[in-house]
Amino acid sequence: MSKTTAPWWKSATAYQIYPRSFCDSNGDGIGDIPGIISKLDYLADLEVGFIWLSPVYRSPMADNGYDISDYQDIAPEFGTLDDFDRLASEARDRGIGIVMDLVVNHTSDEHAWFVDARSGRQADKRDFYIWRDPAADGGPPNDMQSFFGGPAWTLDDSTGQYYLHLFDRKQPDLNWENPALRAEIWSMMNWWLDRGIAGFRMDVIDLIGKDIDRGILADGPRLHEYLQEMHRETLAGRDVVTVGEAWSATPENALLYAGRDRSELSMVFQFEHVSQQWDEKLGKWKPKPFDLVALKRTLNKWQAALAEDGWNSLFWGNHDLPRAVSKYGDDQQYRVESAKMLATVLHLMKGTPYIYQGEEFGMTNAVYTEIGQFRDVETLNYYELQVAAGISPQDFIAGANANGRDNARTPVQWSDAPQAGFSSGTPWIDVNPNYTRINAQQACLDPASIHAHYRRLVQLRKELPLIVDGDYQPWLEAHPQLFAYSRHLDGQTLSVVANFGATGLQLDVPPGMQVSGQALIGNYSSRERIGPQLSLEPYEAFAILS
Ligand code: ISL
Ligand code: CA
């Protein structure tokens, strides 16, 4: 078998940690870095190649750390810089890199830069942020809205100007047009890179090139100029992985970020398959039936677009999204089968797969009944706005249960001990009561668990260059219940077949899809053949190598 020459992050599987919800070592109800260290053996056993660590920097936690008040320090509730260094070195000993979350579209309003900036119009750091005079009536300069609901402008009383915040009012946007600001960011990035981290995940990076006065937010005119400058000043010559969060990315512009001659990023997170499942008008707060054909068309399109150049990131969930098995599978009767099916389909595509904490043993959405159980700033802001606009609290809560960000943020269910083994105290957000059945300890003891299935998929990617480099061919794209594709490299074929439904499926297989070979993985009995006829069990998925 030919050895792959691809960079290390192409055969690695990533694992995302949301520190607040991962593991609490000291009983204050908040996950922390020593808690993460205590689970490194668990992650090494899963054989993940790198951890994307959601923010652990000093922060007032208006948005759980996506509001940073000091980029070069650790939030006390998460630990210390020494704890961080120990995490990085103990992870490295296990062959795991740490990828930091780079949140540089905005800071906290408690960052020293903003504290200085708002101290006067002539302040040294004033121009690190985006200020505008009030409109003639004293109101905001324009009607731009925050992604978290409400105006994107807040008046700073003492200096009489509005500052821009595309997220919460405690997250003022940085002014990337200022070269001195960019220089500060490069030096901060180098400080982390010199500490030995494995790369960066870049928060809402497609917003940094914005042109406010022309109303352009995402994919602005100077975006790629800044990313190339960043590469020159920080990333060049370092063997690291970078992934940019880019809600505006399309198959057409993805190569601008990650094309081989661009010197920008390794890959982007694109969200077309996520947002297409939302309501056109009311967005994610309005539940919408799952559309498999749309999902396939999108994922297949991205596979084709980045076939020769660029690289895909592969994910079903993250800390902003619902639990994969609840969103795309069945989190009741067929939880185990459908979670394995989803993992099989995703992990055998071309790209770098990302596992979101708890996904590897099938954690499910929270089911909340009252607004008081929610913690997320986005959900709470929209609740106020939508209820004021006439939507009933029950309808809003149904939407938040389906797509709200707290679904992903309930504590990781380590065991059936009180509070799911997450904390000896009271967790900052309620544990999902199903932890008595669904937990990592149970999954690790069961050779037929979702966890065992993920582990096998991670190993397969490391063992088979075909999974890393093989080309991708979709089958029966218009079929409403089947997801099938094949991968090809050096005369080998990997065939992947999945039933996305809770009912059995009978199929006449097109001649090109018929194969026989070695059963690689599956969630029912072993399969070595895709014959002219195929009969699939509910949520069955398998892969054959021929
Ligand atoms: O999840 C979302 C889709 O509605 C948005 O709320 C989310 O803000 C968007 O995905 C951008 O996310 C990133 O930046 C935010 C932070 O709150 C998210 O956690 C982060 O992933 C602001 O830093
Ligand atoms: Ca703690």
Image (spheres, rainbow, N blue to C red):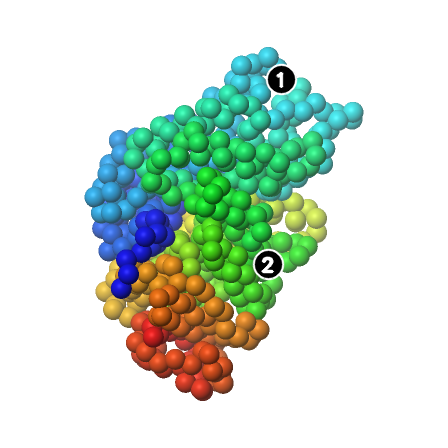
Assess disc 2: are there few (<14), some (14-19) or many (≥20) residues with their C-alpha within 10 Å of its C-alpha.
some
Specify the farthest residue to the front. Answer: 490
Residue underneath mark 1: 158
Residue at image location 24% in from the left, 47% down from the top: 95
| Nearer the camera: disc 2 or disc 1 | 2
Residue 480 located left or right of residue 213: left
Query: Which residue was labeled with disc 2?
Result: 276
Counting from the top left corner in percent of width and height, residue 98 is at 32, 42
Q: Amino acid at mark 2?
A: Gln
Measure the C-alpha gap from mark 2 to mark 1.
Answer: 43 Å
Question: Could you tell whether 480 is left or right of 536 in the image?
Answer: right
Residue 166 horizontal/vertical position (percent): 59, 37
Q: Nearer the viewer, residue 432 or 344?
A: 344
Q: Is residue 310 above or below residue 500?
A: above
Confirm whether residue 420 shows in the render. Answer: no
Quarter of the image for residue 486 reads bottom left
